[in-house]
Amino acid sequence: MCFNNLKGLRLRRVIFVLQGCLFFNKAFRISLQRDKRPSLRREVFCLASKILPFAGGIHPPHSKHSTEDKKVEICKVPDIVKIPLKQHVGAPCVPLVKPGDKVKWGQKIGQPQGYISAAVHSSVSGTVQSIEEAEQPDGSRVETVVIQNDGKDTPDHSIRPGTLESLNAEELRNIVMEAGIVGMGGAAFPTHVKLSPPPERKIDTVILNGSESEPFLTSDDRLMLEHPEDILYGCKVIMKILGVSRAFIAIEDIMPEAIRILSAKAEGEKGIQVVRLGTKYPQGAEKQLIYAITGRQVPSGGLPMDVGTVVQNVGTAAAISRAVRTGEPLTQRIVTVSGGAVREPKNLLVRIGTSFRDVIDCCGGWKEKPVKILSGGPMMGVAQHTLDVPVTKGTSGIVLFTEKEAAMPEVSNCIRCGRCASVCPIRLMPLLISANSLKGNYEEAEKLHALDCIECGSCSFICPAARPLLQSIQVAKKEILAGRKKRDASVSNDLSEGRTDRNKSNRT
Amino acid sequence: MDYFTVSPAPHIRTQESASRIMLDVVIALIPAGIVSIFVNGVGVLWTILISIVTAVLTEYLIQKFMKKPVTINDFSAVVTGILMAYNLPPGAPWWLAVIGSFLAIALVKQLFGGLGHNFMNPALAARAILLAAWPVRMTTWVLPDAVTSATSSATPLAMMEGTWASASKLPSFLDVFLGNIGGSIGETSSVALLIGAAYLLVRKVISWRIPVTYIATTFILTVLLGGHGLYGAFYQIFLGGLILGAFYMATDYSSSPITPKGQIIMGIGCGILTAVIRIYGGYPEGVSYSILLMNVVTPLIDKYTMPKIYGEGKAHA
């Protein structure tokens, strides 16, 4: 009896404590949700504990062990580099050189066309062999400058060091533009465009994205460990350009070292805070990151600047820092080479235009014939059919999959388990969009917000029936956009026909 | 020349599979079957096996006949077979199990497109058909201690349909909870069913939304309208197919809503219908009819409970 009472008492105590925890957890979560503006409490909470505030998400095996402790090595500079004139979102560049020209390292060889475009520079010194169309990691064919390397790395006269203090916002923005810097997380959106918000958009927050949630990739992690000062300097440049006094550096708690080092470095910096985020894919997605840190939601079809926020990858910040301090344009980047098939997984500093083949050779080739070669990580990366594609500004990793790693389960019927819907960070219904897409019912897919899909692939990953959900959603997106274009075209056609009709009637 | 596989992203997939999920459901259903065999005799085991074999065989033959890939190794037909058996009275003749399983797979599942396309829970729909065709056979329950003498008796629920005055004949609460009562094969032991349900919840095969709201709604309405107070309502929860229905049949993926809000509506709807049928209806078929009715409105529920997507409506900066 006595024993029973004691046991009962203990049990009640445990339950009481558990209830307390639950209550606090809930209270915090509710307060987080209610906070539309980032409050001090929220910031303290972000700093104090890991948070997983965005809806959905998955926990794929992170597979970063093989490269996370490896220092960045310099990849052998090849004899021939092939530099594509379009490595970014937007219009391609026109070549500034012709075959036979001598070029220097850092010399601008591609002039951007139009507003959304980014300059291209030579990553070596040498002689232009030819300008030809060549295959890119993203599957497109792009005009490419082939340069024979003379091995001297003679720098171009345009490379001049500068300082943050001596330059104003306009000059800094110009440096970023001239250096051809693009988003280095993989999207490759021209950075100067992001740093030139229209005057009616008030930007008050800068977020540096160091949450490398793609499995296998460790290039951002290594950068944060080895060059934290570059990131902080770049952060200050971005803040100065945008006239913003508050910046966050967001890092997943899977990288405690990076958090520690950057927090220590950021100690004395005014307005810069390191935020520790829970490890969950796609934590590094722009919209999810903004929500996690500020509690703001980018409106459907909108941009981060619509909610006063600019997000830049930490790699981009480091590139900006180098462009300002040394005057060096973007001619190299850190690439993680990993996967079960590669002999020696490494983090490499690679010159832009080095072929995948040369990069893999620099890692001792492969120990087992790879079945799949990915540009980027396994969640959003693009499978390559050849090794003769160049590393571009957006190549964050090269992953070589063995047959076992590349094996895909059989596709079966959708069982409507709803797992895809529960992991979707945008809270879409992937199963319904996919079903409509497969039936060619794109109008219905559009009503289900297919265009809001950020293509993170969480739905395809989690599907127990192994259905190609993302692929069918991508098809729907393409069809919807094509349909819109067609409609616009036919509307303008109707208008012009109407005009000619009127002209006719005028004549008669 | 090297050849590499080219396929769309993502290039990694979860280890979970549809067949693993179905296997989990089979595992969760085993304890209830074992208790039933102990309580109701070995005959129950034969009914379960016949039911499973018929379901799998039907699926195989239909898929062969329709020249579709045969998917009998995904365990979904096994689940339907077990659930069909669990919905039969312990003394049911073998042919009742055969007809039931055949109807469940052929009529309700395969005719509508197979796995994931059945608009109703196959086992429950088959049970409803059997009940309409052989009402006496389907409602002849044998009390555990009367197995040897083979006298038929009503289930406690059927007794309660009469007058509460006959409550003296009702089994004790503990008997009801543990399973020492008359009833369909699967509904015998609430404890065994709850153990399996806990397993499904831990494995995240089902969510709490449908079962918890379902049982809670039934409980509250029975307290308010049942006229037997709290005790009567507790009693009702562990009686009949409520636990079986709430955790194993109302949660059927293909015939229940996929939206979180929709699942709660489904649970509440099932609860209201069950309570109303049990309290005011003519016969003790609350659970199966309420789930079937809610199955039919599932597409409608899904349509009107679509979650708000990121960036829609919520305040911006």
Image (spheres, helix red, strand yellow):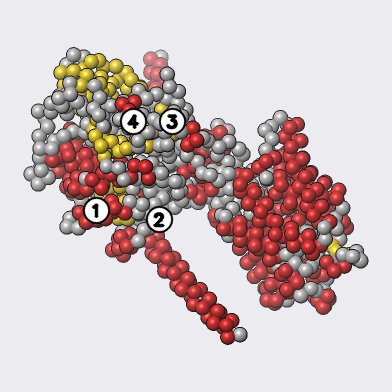
User: In the rendered view, does B102 fall on the left or right side of A165?
Assistant: right
Whether residue A490 is visible to the viewer of this picture, yes or no, is: no
Nearer the viewer's eye, disc 2 or disc 3? 3
User: In the rendered view, does A51 fall on the left or right side of B259?
Assistant: left
Give the chain of mark 3. Answer: A
Nearer the viewer's eye, disc 4 or disc 2? 4
Whole-Å distance between the Cαs marked 1 and 4?
A: 31 Å
Whole-Å distance between the Cαs marked 3 and 4?
A: 11 Å
| Residue at the spot of label 4 | A364
Whole-Å distance between the Cαs marked 2 and 1?
A: 22 Å
Nearer the viewer's eye, disc 1 or disc 4? 4
- Numbered mark located on residue A261 in the image: 1
| Residue at the spot of label 2 | A52
Which amino acid is tagged 3? Answer: Glu
Whole-Å distance between the Cαs marked 2 and 3?
A: 38 Å
Please report whichever mark, 4 or 2, sits nearer to the chain's N-terminal start.
Answer: 2
- Numbered mark located on residue A368 in the image: 3
Which amino acid is tagged 4? Answer: Gly
Contact check, label 1 and label 4, Cβ < 8 Å? no
> Which picture quadrant has residue A47?
bottom left
Which amino acid is tagged 2? Answer: Leu
Whole-Å distance between the Cαs marked 4 and 2?
A: 39 Å
- Is A232 drawn above or below residue A179 in the view shown? below
Front residue (pair A113, B24) = B24
Question: In what element is the residue under mark 3?
Answer: loop
Give the chain of mark 2. Answer: A
Give the chain of mark 4. Answer: A
Nearer the viewer's eye, disc 2 or disc 1? 1
Which amino acid is tagged 1? Answer: Ile
